[in-house]
Image (tube, rainbow, N blue to C red):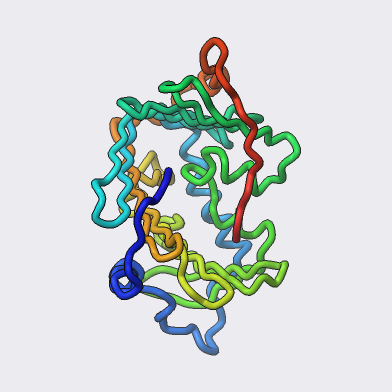
Amino acid sequence: MSLSWIFRTAVISAVLAVCFSAGSAIPALGQKKAPYTPEEIIAFIDKSCEGIESAEGTITRITEYGSDEPDHLEGTFRMRQPDRLFIHFKGETERVIGFDGRYFRIYFSSNNSGFFTDTSELGEKERFILGAAPYIGNMLKLYALDNTLELIDEYEGRYIVKAVPNDGNGGYVLIGISPVTWTVSGIEQFDKDKKLVRQTRVLEFLRVGDTGYFPQTIEISTVFGETLYVETTTFSDITFNSEIDDQRFVITGKKNTNWRERRFKTSQ
C-alpha cells in the first residue's frame, strides 16, 4: 500500500512522543538477581499458549497514516496451531491472505492476481512470522532463535526482556511481558542508532479457558522515513478450539489467476 505523503519532521517527533511514551525510560533492576531466566519465561508463555488450538471469527483492521482518511477493512479470519492462517477482507478492496503450511499467499479479487511465497526453504523464524504464530504463538521464542535474551527491567508491572541480535547489527528489541498472565503485551524495535522504529502493543486480551489469552486488539506503529503508519486489528465474535480442516487454509484464486512469486524479506 502506497504512503503518498510525508510529515514534516517536527510533526512526526511530536506524534512519536505520544505513541512511544514508554520508550526505554524504565527503572533498572540494578544489582538485584533477575527473578527468572529467559528460558523459564519462554516456558511460562508456552503454557499460556496451550489453551488455544484454533480461533475463527470476524476481523476489523484500521490503517492510519496522518491526515488522510484511514483505510477500514472488515472480514473473517481463522487460524490454527502451529501456524495456519486465513484472512478474507471484503468490500471494494477485497483481498485474501493465508498460510497453508507451505505457501503464504495474498490474493486480490479485483484484478484476479496475487503474490505467493514458497516457505519450504525458509527457516523457522520466517515461517513463524508469515503464519498465525504472532497471534497464537510464543513471540519470545521467536526472538530466542537468533538473539541473546536478557531480563533487564521491570516497568508498570511488566518484565522487560532485551533481545540483542547475534549478528551484531547494532539494533535491539524490548519485549514487555506480564508475569500475571504470561503474555507478551508489547514489543519495541530500535535501530542501530537507538531510534525507536516500530512498536507493537496488545491493547486487549481475551481469556480462553483456564490458562489461554488471545490478543483481541493489536496496535502496530511503524515509521517509514518521516511517516507514521498505525495499524489496529480487532478480532470479534470468536469461536475457539473448533476443528478446522487443512483445506480451509488453502488459497487457490480463480481461473487464470496471475500469481507472482515474492521473496521473503525480514528485518530485526
The residue that appears at 47% across and 44% down in the rendered structure is: 135
Classify 23 as above or below 7.
below
Classify 28 as above or below 219.
below
Position of residue 230 measured from the top left corner of the image (x, y, whole percent): 35, 54
Mark yes or no: residue 21 visible. no
Position of residue 152 measured from the top left corner of the image (x, y, whole percent): 53, 77
Direction top: furthest residue:
255
Q: Which quarter of the picture shows residue 200?
A: bottom left
The residue that appears at 49% across and 21% down in the rendered structure is: 243
Q: Which quarter of the picture shows residue 259?
A: top right
The residue that appears at 40% across and 65% down in the rendered structure is: 226
Which quarter of the figure is the C terminus placed in? bottom right
Which quarter of the figure is the N terminus placed in? top left
**Drawn side of residue 37 relative to residue 61, left or right:** right
Mark yes or no: residue 106 visible. yes
Position of residue 8 measured from the top left corner of the image (x, y, whole percent): 32, 69
The residue that appears at 26% across and 50% down in the rendered structure is: 68
